[in-house]
Amino acid sequence: MQTRLYYVHDPMCSWCWGFEPTRRQLFAALEGRLEIERLVGGLAPDTDEPMPEAMRNMLQQTWHRIATSIPGTEFNFEFWEKCQPRRATYPANRAVIAARAQGEEFDTQMTARIQRAYYLEARNPSDNSTLIELADDLGLDCERFADELSSAALQRQLLQEIQHSRMLGIDSFPSLAVEKSGRLHHIALDYNDAQAMLAQIEAI
């Protein structure tokens, strides 16, 4: 049985955004050495309700904390003034799956494009209209993307992917786990040092 590394994330998870530079270093070091499977974890289900003020404040504090603890991580706080936040990340999760359907490489590209739009450009990836614009930026078939984004089949696929991550014992993001010989090994994250995680994976 091939050794497999699972990466479970949410494109609208701010800690995942902070983790990206170190994750890229880690994956580059592991390229060709083991299979890597990316899963979206579904941080927050669909809602049309505006984000409560207390949650808005909590998330802004989280952004400040991440910027302090992971040097180099940037956030555009204009998002909180320009957009109408909703606690809904499922649309962005579906966008990653819909992009992946047009080519495996679009999984990482759509994730990165959503993150830039959200954290740097003060755009709202909870809105399908934003996600379709981002798909166009990537050169995807936008008509196909838009159709699939709102389809029942894609929603089922998202729920299956979320269930898969839960079966791996993962319910926080980002998370890494290595499966080898039928056993699952959870990797302790280091947001600033890829080598620390690489050492854990190599030991397995």
Image (cartoon, rainbow, N blue to C red):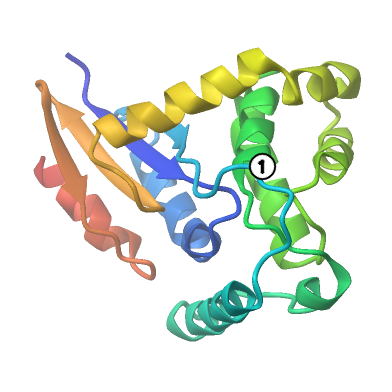
| Residue 122 in picture, x, y percent from top left | 81, 66
Left or right: 67, with 82 as reference point: left
Residue placed at 66% from the left, 19% from the top? 103
Numbered disc 1: secondary structure: helix
Residue at image point 49% right, 49% down: 43
Relative depth, front residue between 19 and 80? 80
- Seen in the picture, residue 181 relative to 113 is either above or below; the reply is above
Give the residue number, with chain letter if any, for mark 1: 92
Res 101 visible: no
Count of marks, rendered view = 1
Q: Is residue 116 left or right of residue 27?
A: right
- Residue at 74% x, 79% y is 77
What kind of residue is marked 1?
Answer: Ala
Dividing the image into 4 quarters, which one contains the N terminus?
Answer: top left
Q: Is residue 5 left or right of residue 110?
A: left
* Mark 1 surroundings within 10 Å by alpha-carbon count, few (fewer than 14), some (14 through 19), many (20 or more): many
Of residues 52 and 83, the one drawn nearer to the viewer in this rendering: 52
Q: Position of residue 157 (x, y in %)?
A: 53, 19
Task: Using the image, determine if residue 113 lies above or below residue 152.
Answer: below
Q: Residue at x 43, y 82 (%)?
A: 69
In the rendered image, which quarter is residue 115 located in?
A: bottom right
Q: Position of residue 57 (x, y in %)?
A: 60, 81
Give how far across and how far down residue 129 sits, in percent. 88, 41
**Closer to the camera, 145 or 189?**
145
**Image quarter hosting the C terminus:** top left
